[in-house]
Image (cartoon, coloured by chain):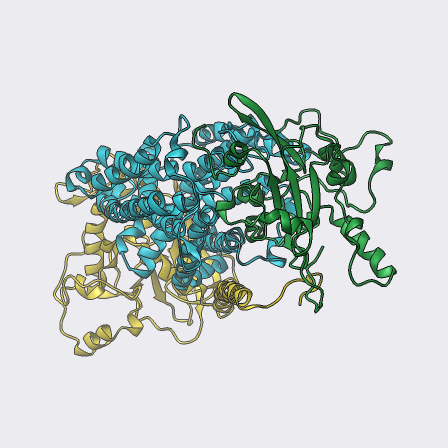
Chain colours: A cyan, B green, C yellow
Amino acid sequence: MDDTLIGRGLRRTSLPRFLLWLVPWAALLALGLYAVYLCFAIGLNQTNMDNRFAFGLWIYLDLTVIALGAGAFFTGFLLYILKKKELKAVINSAVVIGFICYSGAVGILMVDVGQPLRAWFTFWHPNVHSMLAEVTFCLTLYLSVLAIEYAPLVLKNRRLKEVPGLLVLEHQLHKVMVVFAGIGTLLSFFHQGSLGGLYGVLRGNPFAFREHIGIWPTTFFLFILSAAAVGPSFILLTTWLVGKVSRKRLVSPEVFQTLAKISGWLLLVYVVLKGIDSLVWINSTSPKTGVQVSSFYAHPPFGTWVLFAEVVLLGLVPAALLLSRRVRARTGLLVLAAAMACAGIVLNRYVMTIQTLALPSLPFDSFLSYSPSWQETAAFLAVLGYGVLLYSISFRWLNLFPEERELATKG
Amino acid sequence: MHTQKHTTSLPAHRYTLVVDLDRCTGCGACGTACAVENNIPPAADKATERTGTVWMRVQEAAAGDGPATFVPIPCQQCDHPPCVDVCPQRAIEYDPRTGIVAQIPVRCLGCRYCMVACPYHTRSFNWWTPEWPEGMKSTLNPDVSIRTRGVVEKCNFCVQRLQAARAKASAAGQAEIDPADYVPACVEACPSRALSFGDAADENGEVARLAKDPESFRLLAGLGTGPKVLYRSSDPAVRERLSRTGVTRG
Amino acid sequence: MLPGNTDFILDPANVIFLGVFALVLVVVVGTLASAIVSARRAVVRGQAAAILWHEEFEELPASARDCRHAMTGEMPGRRCERAFDCKGCETHARLLADAKPLPAIDAGGFFVLADRLYHRGHAWLKSEEDGTVTLGLDDLATRLVGTPDALVLPAVGERLAENGPAFRLKAGKARVRVASPVSGEVVETGSFAKGFLLRVKPDGPLDTRALLSGREAAAFFGRERDRLQLVLSAAQGIPALADGGVLVGDLSSAIPEEDRDRVLGEMLLEA
C-alpha cells in the first residue's frame, strides 16, 4: 500500500504488519508522555529524586545514550575525514541513531530541570567555567548538525526525490557534508568530554574529583575516549539487531570487522588510561583530601567488584575479544564482545552518576539509596519507544543501508 | 543580588556564623525562625526530610554509645564555593565585599547541579509549588522574594537584614553598619545562645579570636571549600569525629 | 554589556568560549544557507533534471554503466563515469573522429530500426520532416512492460528536459519513469497503437551525440539482453529468458510480480 514510499529493490513487510509492530512502542511513548505531563503539571515531586539525590535515572540515562550515540559523530569522522569508505554502509543508520539518542536526551533534560522555559538563560547568562554550560552549548549546536545530517536521508526518499527542488537540495547538502562531519566531530569531542568533566570538577566530592590537565579533569578525556570506543560497537550491535529483526542482510561482513577493530583498539587505550587514572586517584588525589578510596567501596552493593567489573570484565576483556581475529570471525561472539563493551560504558556512567550521590560526604552522613519512580522509568521508556518508532519508520521508507539492495540481489 | 563592580574603600567583610555545639540542644528554633524570616513555604503533604525545604538543617551526629551531638548546618558560605563554579547560568554569586554566597532564584533553571556539587548538602529544591494556607500569606516577610516551583534555594545569611542595616547606616550618614543591626534570624532565635555571628575580617572582633581558638573547627576543611561557619566544642572526641573528611564506614 | 545582563563582562575566558561557539554557529548556518541558495539557483536555472540524472546514475549497479564503446568492442570493459554524457566526453569525440568500421554484433533478438536513435534509458527518438521529433519506447522495454496498467503522458504544452522524466508507466507492482532523449515542448500525445507516444518540438538545434544508432544500437541491445538476464537472476524463481536459444516472446510474463518494479527500474535506469 505504501509501495511508492519504499525504496526500489528493497523488500519490506506489509503495511498492516508494520503498523502492528509500531503499536507497543507507540504505547510506551504514550505512557511516557503521560508521565512527563504529570511532571510538568504537578512538579518534580513525581520523581523519587530529592535534595540529596538531586540527579537520578534521567541524568544517568542522558549520559549513557549520549555515550552510545557517539557512533554518529565518530563514524562520520572515520568516513568523511579519515576516508574509511567501507563505513558508507552504516553511516546513515548511525546518523539516525545519533539523532534519536541526542533528541531523546535533550527531551529528557527539559523534563528534568525545574524551569524548562528558562533554558535560554544558559545562553544569555553563561558561566563559561561551568561544564554544564559547555554541555548545553555543544548539545544544542550538535543536535542541529545531526538534524542537518538527517535531512538528506529524508530528501532521498523515493517519493520526495521526485520533487526537483528537494533532490537538488540533497545533492548540495551532500557536497558539503564533510563540513558538518568535521563540526560534528569538534562539538562531540567537547561535549562528551564535558559530561565527564561534570563530575571530575567536583571539589567537594572526592569520589568524583580527579586531577586536572589544564582546565580539564582527566574524566574529560576518559569520557571522550570511552564514547569513541563504544560508538562503533553500538553501531555494530544495532546493525546486527536490525538485521535480525528484519531478517535481512544489511551490511557486508567487512564492515563489522572494521567497526570491531576500531572499537577494540580504542577500548584498549581507554582501559589502560583509566587504569592509570584510577591508580593516581587511589594513591594521590583522594588521600590528599583526607579520604581513602577504600571507604567508597565499603557500602554494599558498591564493593570494589564494581571497579573491577568496569575496567577488567567489561573493559579489558571485550577489548581483547574485539581485537581477536578468531572472535571476529564468528558473528555471535563478535556481537557479544560489542555488547560487553557497551555494557562497560553503561556501568561507568552509572558509577559516575549514581554512586557519586549515594556516598556520604559529611562524616555523620549515611549511605543513601534511590530507586526511580514509575514516572521516571516511564519517561525513560518513552525515549526507547520514540527511538524504535523513528528508526522503524526510517528503516522502512529511507535507504538506511546502501548495501542492502546489492546484498539482496546477490542472493 | 548582583555583584556590582564599583570602587570602594571599605574593607571586605567575612561574615561568619559561630556554632557552639556544647550548647546546641537540637530544639530547632533556629530553623523555625529562618523559615519565618525567609518565607519558606510549609511542607507539602508528601514531603519528607529529604524533599522538604530547609535552609537551617539541624542534623544529629550519632556517637555510638555516647550522647548525640546536634549540628546546625546552614549554607557554609564558602570562600571557594563549589556551587558558584558549576552553575551554568551564574544564578549564584559570591560577593567579595561580604563573602556571602547569594542564590538568585529568578535566574535559576532548576538543573540542580549546584546541589550535586555542595558537599554539605545545604541546598533545597522546590519539588512542589510553594503554597500557603488561607491567610498565612499576610505573615510573609516583604524583604524576601518568594520562590517558584522548580528552583533551588538556600541560606543567604539573612542578607536582607544586611541591606536593611546598610540603609539605616546610610540614612544616618555612616559609612559602616552597626554590627548589632545585622543579626541573622537563627542567631536571634536560639534560646541557648549556641549561635553567634560576626565579621571575621575584623581583627579585633570575637569571631577572629574564636577562629584561632583550638576548640574551633570547620566541616570538611580538607576539601578546600573555605567554609565561613565555625563550629566549636570543648569535647575533643566531638571535634575529631565531626571534622573528618568522609566516612570510614557506612 | 547586554540588555538585562548587568554582570556579564568580556574577560578572556568569556570571549574565547563565546567566540568559538559563535564561529561554529556561523559556519553551520552559513554552510546550510549556501547549500540552500545553490539548490535554489540550480532549480531556477533548470539544472534539476541534470542533477537528478546524475544522482540516479550514481545509484546504478556497475552492470548498467557500460560505455557504448565497450559494447561495440572498441574499448572492452570500459565503464561510463559521466552519466552517459557523451557530448562532453573526450574519448567519444576521439573515437568518432577515428571512425573505424564497427564489427557486427547480434542484436540479441530485438528489433532495431535504422531510422531512429536510441537513449540508454530505452526511449527512441525519430526526427520528423516538420522539425518535430517523435518519442517512443524501444522494443526491449515494450516487451518487458507488456501491456501497462497505466501510461501517464505529459499534457500538450508541457516541457520536457533531456534525461528528465518523459512519461510514466504503471505495470503490476512497478511504477517507473521513462527518461526523455531530448529537451522541448510536447505538441502531441500518442499511444502504442499510433506508433509513437509523444511528439516534441525540440529546444534549439537537435544535438543527438548522446544517442545510439545503427550498429552501435544493435550492440547496445545485445548487452542489455545480457544485463536483463543478470537483473532477473536475482529474482525469486529464476525465469528462463530464452527457450532453446530463441527469446521468449512475452518477456513481461517471465518476471515474477514482486520483482517487476525492481527489474523495470534497473533496466530503465531509475534507482
Q: Is residue C213 something one can see in this rendering? A: yes
Q: Residue at x 74, y 44 (%)?
A: B184
Farthest residue in the bottom direction? C97
Residue A409 lies, with reference to residue B101, above or below; the image says above
In the shown orientation, is residue B174 left or right of residue A231?
right
Image coordinates of residue C269 in percent, x first then y, are 32, 54
Which of B214 and B34 lies nearest the eye of the viewer?
B214
Instruction: Out of A185 and B74, give the one closest to the viewer.
Output: B74
Q: Is residue A27 left or right of residue A43?
A: left
Q: Is residue C82 above or below residue A363?
A: below
Residue at 30% in and 74% down: C88
Q: Quadrant of residue A408?
A: top left
Q: Is residue C235 visible?
A: no
Task: Provide residue A186's location: percent of width, then percent of height.
Answer: 41, 59
In x, y percent, where is residue A295?
40, 34
| Depth check, front residue: C133 or C179 | C179
Q: Residue B175 falls in which quadrant of the image?
A: bottom right
The C terminus of chain A sits in image quarter: top left
Q: Position of residue C168 (x, y in %)?
A: 43, 51
What residue do we see at 59% from left, 68% from top?
C10
Which residue reaches farthest top?
B65
Counting the numbered discs, the total is 0
